[in-house]
Amino acid sequence: MVTTSARLRAFVELAETGSVRAAATRLFVTEASVSASITALARDVGVPLVEKHGRGVRLTTAGQAYARYARTILGLHDEALAAARGESCAETGLIRLAAATTAGEHLLPNLLATFRAAHPKVDIRLHVSPRDEVWRMLGHHEVDLVMAGRPPAQLSSCVRAIRENTLVVVGAPEVAAGFSPERATWLLREDGSGTRATCLGLLATLESQPPTLTLGSNGAVVAGAVAGLGVTLVSRDAVRTQCRDGQLVELAVPGTPMDRPWHVVTHAEITPSIGLLLTELLADRRWHRPTR
């Protein structure tokens, strides 16, 4: 018998992928199973949730509204399981993490390695995604803790720790010679990236609009800058090695360096397992509790 939870997961995967086949692949079930779950769910709700669109399907307006609640329902269900397991024993609880790309690549690995060595039985699940996505996940209770920049003002959350983060403009040494912000090619992150939005804001202050090239991930823009494709705005944490080795140099641009602290954010209530992780995090003196 298919549970309501399984039907909701099938519907959410369909909403995210836009395809019955892709949803079935993600869930490791048959396409017929996904279709049956969506049909049963629509019957329970009482209105059509999907409609035919070309050779595939798409969400109806009602389906789009329902999908937002479905994500939160599933997130709260998983959060409830994590809370119950954590209350039973913090050392065997579940921690659901999400981190903005740069934080996930450069800050979390060392923290998680240290934490797992001390608490090997805690179940850790990590999502590394652009800024917009990780805050959406926290808002839908799909994760318990986020490491990223400043949280959106409308998000109901609790900042647990802050760490210095400086954004700088970097380029290869050969690009630095004769560098002009207005004439250089600027390498951009993917849509949804907080650094991309900040970089576009910086470019808007220049007297002329320079050419841009979207490369996507944090690693891609750094590699592009090293290769001499252009310059980029990036966290100093992400290019420390390249600058030390002389592959990149920091460039003077009005308005930079920029102070954009890292934030560790949770819901108001946390599980004992999350408490263990926060204790480990704050043992690093580069992190501090927010001032009231």
Image (cartoon, rainbow, N blue to C red):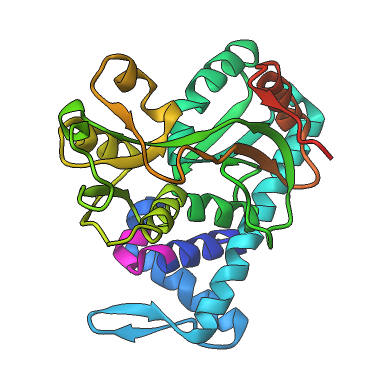
Q: Quadrant of the C terminus?
A: top right
Inspect the magenta stretch and tell me whether residue 172 lies in it: no
Write the residue at 55% across / 22% down. Answer: 112
**Which of the 4 image quarters holds residue 240?**
top left
Q: Check the image and report above or below for 99 versus 26.
A: above
Q: Is residue 14 visible?
A: yes
How far across and how far down the image is residue 23, in percent? 37, 60
Q: For the point 81% across and 32% down, which residue is it?
A: 87
Quadrant of residue 102 within the rendered picture: top left
Q: Give the mark count.
A: 0
Question: Residue pushed farthest top?
Answer: 117
As drawn, the residue found furthest toward the bottom would be 47
- Please identify the quadrant where the N terminus is shown: bottom right
Location of residue 67 with respect to 108 vertically, above or below: below
The location of residue 53, given as percent across then percent down, is: 30, 84
| 71 with respect to 201 (left or right) | right
Residue 30 seen in the figure: no
Q: Position of residue 148 (x, y in %)?
A: 55, 42
Depth check: 49 or 171 in front? Answer: 171
* Picture quadrant where residue 241 is located: top left
Q: At 37% from the left edge and 79% from the top edge, which residue is drawn?
A: 58
In this view, 279 is above or below 151: above
Q: Residue 29, position in %: x, y? A: 38, 55
Judge left or right: residue 1 versus residue 266.
left
- The vertical placement of 74 against 158, above or below, is below
Q: Main secondary structure of the magenta part?
A: helix
| Residue 19 colored in magenta in the image | yes
Q: Where are the magenta residues, as a range? A: 16-23
Most extreme residue toward the right, as rendered?
292
**Residue situated in front as seen by the camera: 71 or 291:** 291
User: Which residue is painted at 26% across and 39% down in the image?
Assistant: 220
